[in-house]
Amino acid sequence: MHLNKLYLSALILVLPIYLSFLACKNNTPPPAVRSIKVVKVISVPEKNVVGYDKYPCSIQGINNNDVRAKISGYIKEVYIDEGQKVGKGQKLFRLETNMLTENANAAQSAISAAEANIAAAKSAVSAAQVEVNKLIPLVEKQIISPIQLETAKANLASAQSRLLQAEAGKNQAMANLNSINANIDYSIIRAPISGTIGSLSHKEGSLVSPSDPTPLTTISDTRQLYAYFSMNESQYLDFLEKTQGTTLAQKLKNLPKVQLILANGATYEQEGSIETVTGQIDPKTGTIQFRALFPNANQLLSNGNTGVIKIPKTFEKVIVIPESATVDQQGIVHVFKVEKDTARSTIVKISERINNMAIVENGLKQGEHVIALGVGSVQNGIPVKEQVISFDSLLNSLKPLFE
């Protein structure tokens, strides 16, 4: 009887624990089923792609001419304004010429005096010649002494010498007058070329001289414009290696037309041509300079503009993928191919990146499926379900990374 009570007590203690264990066992959830990620993929295409090499440039007129004074003087009149179009030979400035005019009057008086001296000297020569001519037959007839004739001849030579001196004095006076007149002419400063007037550094009343460091103004012929840009040594060697032609002249001739991007980001309406390159690399900058020519018939560009030169380069039949499909890890580029409904990380080599596209040098083949979006959340080896999208429509929906 005592044992039965003991058994009953033990059963009462254990039974709730057992029932609780059964309850917990019945409530255990089943093992989780691994989810399948839906991914957007593209079929890797082969395309012809046009990209651009870009270089900052400075723009100048084909002829920029500093206007300077040839003589010293105060500016009395300014005939032009900044930005004005002028023709070659047109008046720009007039300098004060009061002193020059006085000098010219004095020089003219000197010429008149020299002419009077010449007239007097000619008369003296004539008289001396008459005297010599008169004495010659008298000496021949021994009527007078030869000494008289020699004295007359000496007087003639002296008169002739004074005539030469008077003529030389007139020539000197005329040269002096011509010089003064030239300076008076220089007081009118004219346009050396046709073009557009730049800033006017000197106004009416300013004292100017040929030694001034700053020109009166600059005239720019901007009917055509030069765009100057530079390549570093590595870029220049690539240009020589990749451009068709055996000589530099042939390579320049084979270059395509180039575009000019203005400072506001707009593309200039006219294409240009690369014409020449300097003969050596600048040791100070390590660059070599190119020059491209652009038409400017509408005068939309001016001397001093800046911009960017875009040189097109074509890649034919290359494997391309969207930039959004790439993952860069410490310089190594990965993409996720889809093979048998599984994402597989694949290393690829990218040769160029153009307009949200990456040109694949190796690692992918045409037609393979690559995850195009959301690669940051994809892990290697996970099961996926493909949603194929158009390569072109994807690119059109993406905002360009670089212009």
Image: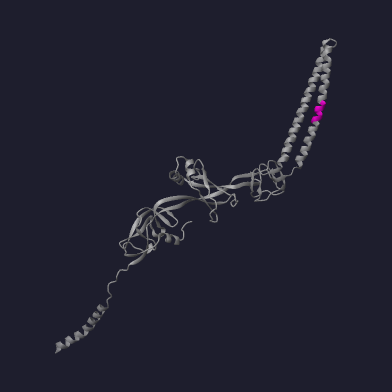
| Point 74% across, 38% down: residue | 181
- Residue 290 visible to an observer of this rendering: no
Using the rendered view, name the quadrant where residue 386 is placed: bottom left
Looking at the rendered structure, the number of numbered marks drawn on it comes to 0
> Could you say where residue 137 lies in the image, as x and y percent from the top left?
83, 13
Q: Quadrant of the N terminus?
A: bottom left
| Point 78% across, 27% down: residue | 166
Q: Residue furthest right?
A: 143
Magenta run includes residue 145:
no
Q: Is residue 120 above or below residue 234?
A: above
- Residue 219 visible to an observer of this rendering: yes
Q: Main secondary structure of the magenta part?
A: helix
Q: Is residue 102 left or right of residue 24?
A: right
> Could you say where residue 240 lies in the image, as x and y percent from the top left?
45, 43
> Could you say where residue 39 lies in the image, as x and y percent from the top left?
36, 64
Q: How is the image coloured?
A: one colour
Front-most of residues 45 and 340:
45
Q: Which residues are magenta?
A: 114-120
Q: Is residue 216 left or right of residue 126?
A: left
> Could you say where residue 179 lies in the image, as x and y percent from the top left?
72, 36
Q: Residue furthest bottom?
A: 1
| Point 43% across, 44% down: residue | 241
Q: Is residue 95 left or right of residue 315?
A: right
Front-most of residues 36 and 257:
257
Using the rendered view, name the quadrant where residue 146 is placed: top right
